[in-house]
Amino acid sequence: TICCHSFRRRETRFLQQTMQAKPFLAPEVQYRLVLSHIPFTYNHTAADHDGSHPFNIEIPLYTQWARLLREEMRPHLMLCGHLHRLLISMPGGPYDQKGQPCPVIIGSHPEADAEGGPRYAGTALTLRPGSAWVAFTNQDGEILRQETLAI
Protein backbone atom coordinates (compact mmCIF):
# COMPACT_ATOMS: atom_id res chain seq x y z
CA THR A 1 0.00 0.00 0.00
CA ILE A 2 1.31 3.44 -0.86
CA CYS A 3 -0.03 6.74 0.38
CA CYS A 4 1.51 9.03 -2.19
CA HIS A 5 -0.89 11.94 -1.72
CA SER A 6 -0.24 11.92 2.04
CA PHE A 7 3.50 11.83 1.35
CA ARG A 8 3.23 14.81 -1.02
CA ARG A 9 1.27 16.77 1.61
CA ARG A 10 4.09 16.08 4.10
CA GLU A 11 6.61 17.13 1.47
CA THR A 12 4.67 20.39 0.98
CA ARG A 13 4.87 21.08 4.73
CA PHE A 14 8.60 20.32 4.61
CA LEU A 15 9.07 22.77 1.72
CA GLN A 16 7.06 25.46 3.52
CA GLN A 17 9.09 24.99 6.72
CA THR A 18 12.35 25.07 4.75
CA MET A 19 11.31 28.29 3.00
CA GLN A 20 10.53 29.88 6.39
CA ALA A 21 13.79 28.73 8.03
CA LYS A 22 15.86 29.64 4.93
CA PRO A 23 18.89 27.38 5.59
CA PHE A 24 19.82 27.83 1.92
CA LEU A 25 20.74 31.48 2.65
CA ALA A 26 23.52 30.53 5.09
CA PRO A 27 26.84 32.18 4.14
CA GLU A 28 28.55 28.85 3.51
CA VAL A 29 25.96 27.75 0.90
CA GLN A 30 27.47 28.20 -2.55
CA TYR A 31 24.91 26.38 -4.68
CA ARG A 32 21.22 25.68 -4.24
CA LEU A 33 20.16 22.42 -5.88
CA VAL A 34 16.79 20.68 -5.97
CA LEU A 35 16.76 16.90 -6.38
CA SER A 36 13.55 15.25 -7.51
CA HIS A 37 13.02 11.93 -9.22
CA ILE A 38 10.14 13.34 -11.27
CA PRO A 39 10.54 16.69 -13.04
CA PHE A 40 7.31 17.90 -11.46
CA THR A 41 7.15 21.13 -13.48
CA TYR A 42 6.45 19.08 -16.62
CA ASN A 43 3.05 17.78 -17.76
CA HIS A 44 3.42 14.49 -19.59
CA THR A 45 2.15 14.11 -23.13
CA ALA A 46 0.63 11.17 -24.95
CA ALA A 47 4.05 10.39 -26.46
CA ASP A 48 5.57 9.92 -23.00
CA HIS A 49 3.64 6.83 -21.95
CA ASP A 50 2.02 5.22 -24.95
CA GLY A 51 -0.91 7.60 -24.83
CA SER A 52 -1.63 7.42 -21.12
CA HIS A 53 -1.04 10.18 -18.60
CA PRO A 54 -0.59 8.41 -15.24
CA PHE A 55 1.85 11.02 -13.97
CA ASN A 56 -0.21 14.16 -14.66
CA ILE A 57 -1.32 14.38 -11.06
CA GLU A 58 -1.18 16.93 -8.28
CA ILE A 59 -0.91 19.81 -10.77
CA PRO A 60 -1.99 22.52 -8.27
CA LEU A 61 0.35 21.09 -5.62
CA TYR A 62 3.32 20.81 -7.98
CA THR A 63 2.63 24.35 -9.21
CA GLN A 64 2.77 25.47 -5.57
CA TRP A 65 6.11 23.68 -5.12
CA ALA A 66 7.52 25.41 -8.20
CA ARG A 67 6.31 28.80 -6.94
CA LEU A 68 7.82 28.27 -3.48
CA LEU A 69 11.15 27.26 -4.95
CA ARG A 70 11.11 30.04 -7.56
CA GLU A 71 10.12 32.85 -5.18
CA GLU A 72 11.81 31.79 -1.95
CA MET A 73 14.81 29.56 -2.64
CA ARG A 74 15.80 30.57 -6.17
CA PRO A 75 17.79 27.36 -6.83
CA HIS A 76 20.59 27.24 -9.36
CA LEU A 77 19.58 23.84 -10.80
CA MET A 78 17.09 21.03 -10.41
CA LEU A 79 18.28 17.48 -11.11
CA CYS A 80 15.73 14.85 -12.15
CA GLY A 81 15.32 11.51 -13.88
CA HIS A 82 12.12 9.57 -14.54
CA LEU A 83 11.55 10.57 -18.18
CA HIS A 84 14.36 8.35 -19.55
CA ARG A 85 15.74 11.29 -21.50
CA LEU A 86 18.89 13.34 -21.52
CA LEU A 87 17.93 17.00 -21.73
CA ILE A 88 18.12 20.39 -20.12
CA SER A 89 14.83 22.19 -19.71
CA MET A 90 15.11 25.95 -19.42
CA PRO A 91 12.45 28.05 -17.69
CA GLY A 92 9.66 28.87 -20.14
CA GLY A 93 10.68 26.06 -22.48
CA PRO A 94 8.58 23.16 -23.75
CA TYR A 95 9.10 21.08 -20.57
CA ASP A 96 8.01 23.90 -18.25
CA GLN A 97 4.28 23.95 -17.57
CA LYS A 98 4.31 25.05 -13.92
CA GLY A 99 6.90 27.81 -13.74
CA GLN A 100 10.31 26.21 -13.34
CA PRO A 101 12.43 27.91 -10.70
CA CYS A 102 15.66 27.24 -12.64
CA PRO A 103 17.10 25.02 -15.38
CA VAL A 104 15.98 21.41 -14.92
CA ILE A 105 18.47 18.72 -15.90
CA ILE A 106 16.70 15.48 -16.80
CA GLY A 107 19.45 12.92 -17.01
CA SER A 108 18.60 9.24 -17.01
CA HIS A 109 18.37 6.98 -20.00
CA PRO A 110 18.35 3.18 -19.88
CA GLU A 111 18.76 1.31 -23.14
CA ALA A 112 19.90 -2.08 -24.38
CA ASP A 113 23.30 -2.69 -25.91
CA ALA A 114 23.84 -4.72 -29.11
CA GLU A 115 23.48 -7.99 -27.18
CA GLY A 116 20.32 -6.83 -25.38
CA GLY A 117 22.09 -6.18 -22.09
CA PRO A 118 21.42 -3.06 -20.03
CA ARG A 119 23.28 0.18 -20.67
CA TYR A 120 22.69 3.38 -18.80
CA ALA A 121 23.35 7.06 -19.29
CA GLY A 122 23.27 9.66 -16.57
CA THR A 123 24.50 13.12 -15.66
CA ALA A 124 27.86 14.44 -14.59
CA LEU A 125 27.85 17.91 -13.07
CA THR A 126 30.65 20.33 -12.20
CA LEU A 127 29.70 23.54 -10.42
CA ARG A 128 31.84 26.64 -10.51
CA PRO A 129 31.03 30.21 -9.47
CA GLY A 130 28.62 31.46 -12.12
CA SER A 131 28.45 28.29 -14.20
CA ALA A 132 27.55 24.62 -14.28
CA TRP A 133 29.14 22.14 -16.65
CA VAL A 134 26.60 19.45 -17.46
CA ALA A 135 27.63 16.28 -19.24
CA PHE A 136 25.45 13.34 -20.12
CA THR A 137 27.64 10.26 -19.88
CA ASN A 138 27.16 6.58 -20.55
CA GLN A 139 28.13 3.81 -18.14
CA ASP A 140 31.63 3.74 -19.64
CA GLY A 141 32.14 7.41 -18.81
CA GLU A 142 31.96 8.54 -22.43
CA ILE A 143 30.45 12.00 -22.86
CA LEU A 144 27.35 11.85 -25.04
CA ARG A 145 26.57 15.55 -24.84
CA GLN A 146 27.79 18.48 -22.79
CA GLU A 147 26.75 22.02 -22.12
CA THR A 148 27.83 24.86 -19.86
CA LEU A 149 25.02 26.80 -18.18
CA ALA A 150 25.21 30.20 -16.55
CA ILE A 151 23.90 29.94 -13.01
Image (cartoon, rainbow, N blue to C red):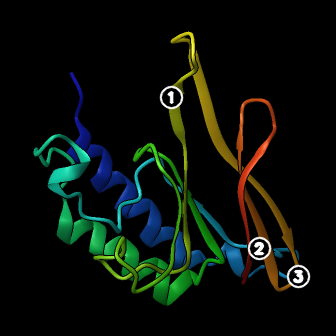
The reply, left or right, for residue 66 in relation to residue 128 is left
Q: Quadrant of the N terminus?
A: top left
The reply, left or right, for residue 102 in relation to residue 64 is right
Mark earlier in primary sequence (3, 1): 1
**Residue at horizontal 15 percent and vertical 44 percent from the top:** 54
Q: In which quarter of the view is residue 26 placed?
A: bottom right
- Count all numbered tags in the image, as a single digit: 3
Disc 3 residue type? Answer: Pro
Can residue 57 be seen here? The reply is no
Residue labelled with disc 2:
31
Residue 2 point in image, percent of width and height: 24, 28
Q: Quadrant of the C terminus?
A: bottom right
Could you tell me how far apart the alpha carbons at marks 3 and 1 are, in whole angstroms?
34 Å
**Residue at horizontal 72 percent and vertical 30 percent from the top:** 139
The reply, left or right, for residue 87 in relation to residue 146 is left
For label 2, the crowd category at 10 Å Cα-Cα, with few meaning under 14, some 14 to 19 and many 20 or more, is some
Residue labelled with disc 3:
129
Residue 9 point in image, percent of width and height: 28, 55
Q: Are the residues at dot 3 and dot 2 in contact (C-beta closer than 8 Å)? A: no
Tell me the SS state at disc 1: strand
Residue 96 in the image: above or below residue 9 = below
For label 3, the crowd category at 10 Å Cα-Cα, with few meaning under 14, some 14 to 19 and many 20 or more, is few
Residue labelled with disc 1:
111
**Which one is in front in this view, the residue at disc 3 or the one at disc 1?**
1
**Residue at horizontal 50 percent and vertical 28 percent from the top:** 111
For label 1, the crowd category at 10 Å Cα-Cα, with few meaning under 14, some 14 to 19 and many 20 or more, is few
